[in-house]
Amino acid sequence: MKFSFRPTEGAFYELFTRAAQNLVRGTELLNELALPGVDVQSVSERLTEVEHDSDQITHDLYKKINSTFITPFDREDIYRLGSLLDDVMDHLEAVGNLLYLYGLTKLPALPRELHELVNVLDQQAKLTAEAMPRLKSMKDLEDYWIECNRLENDGDQAYRMLLVRLFSGEYDALTVLKMKEVADELEAACDAFEHVANTVETIAVKES
């Protein structure tokens, strides 16, 4: 029988789970941008609210690390995982804000490849939210990080095809510059999800 001298401090797992659930809320809001007649300002404002909630969760996590004598796993890993989850939310919020501030949703239609990237992010978010509660037992996590990494590859492909579309001459130069910034934030979010998955893998290997 395997014994562990680390406590099963439930508060950490709860905070990770809440942070990941906020990422699902974020990608669901971005998906609203594909709906006809969507209120883009409302989407942007709600994304900012979710991002503020995520900031508070991250702040609570850091306080918990500093006030807990023995943590469930390495403090550095707890800090890194919390920081990476927050990074994803920052990128999601930036996408919504840029689309609104740049007036890009006034275009006849956003590029199909942009929606494909958002769909990849939505799948990554749901996978991450399902995985976080399993950190407590460190079981059944391998499929999560493998699939999250596979989805990141899909995101890279969609990002490259979006760039091809942007530089095809379909859009004027100013629109291309604006849309490229949005595309970069979407791609950064995909990468950030992969970094979360890689950190979970590192934690699981250490604790096995």
Image (cartoon, grey):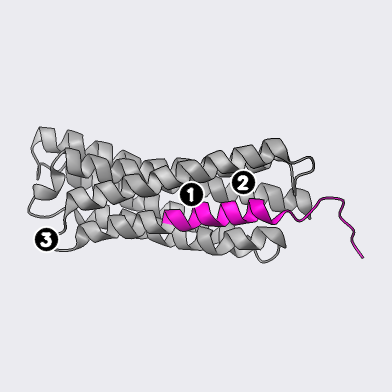
Of the two numbered discs 2 and 1 on the same chain, state the one appearing first in sequence: 1
Q: What stretch is highlighted in magenta?
A: 1-23
Give the camera-side residue of 116 and 62.
62
- Quarter holding residue 74: top right
For the residues carrying marks 1 and 3, which lies nearer the camera in this image?
A: 3
**Which mark identifies residue 193?**
1
Estimate the x, y position of residue 78 in percent, counting from the top left: 65, 43
Res 118 visible: yes
Location of residue 50 with respect to 143 vertically, above or below: above
At a point 8% along the width and 37% down the height, the residue shown is 172
Q: In this view, does 20 lie to the left or right of 76?
A: left
> Which is closer to the viewer, label 2 or label 3?
3
Place of residue 185 in the rendered image (x, y in percent of width and height, measured from the top left):
34, 40
Q: Residue 37 carries which label?
A: 3
**In the rendered structure, which amino acid carries the disc numbered 1?**
Phe
Q: Which residue is drawn at 23% across and 40% down?
A: 98
Disc 1 on helix, strand or loop?
helix
Location of the C terminus (image quadrant) = bottom right
Q: How crowded is mark 2: few (under 14 residues within 10 Å), some or many (20 or more)?
A: some
> What distance separates the C-alpha of mark 1 from that of mark 3?
30 Å
> To which residue does mark 2 refer?
199
Q: Do the residues labelled 1 and 3 touch (CB within 8 Å)?
A: no
Indicate the quadrant where residue 23 lies: bottom left
Which of 72 and 172 lies nearest the eye of the viewer?
72
Residue 109 drawn at (x, y percent): 12, 55
Amino acid identity at mark 3 = Gly
100 relative position to 156: left or right = left
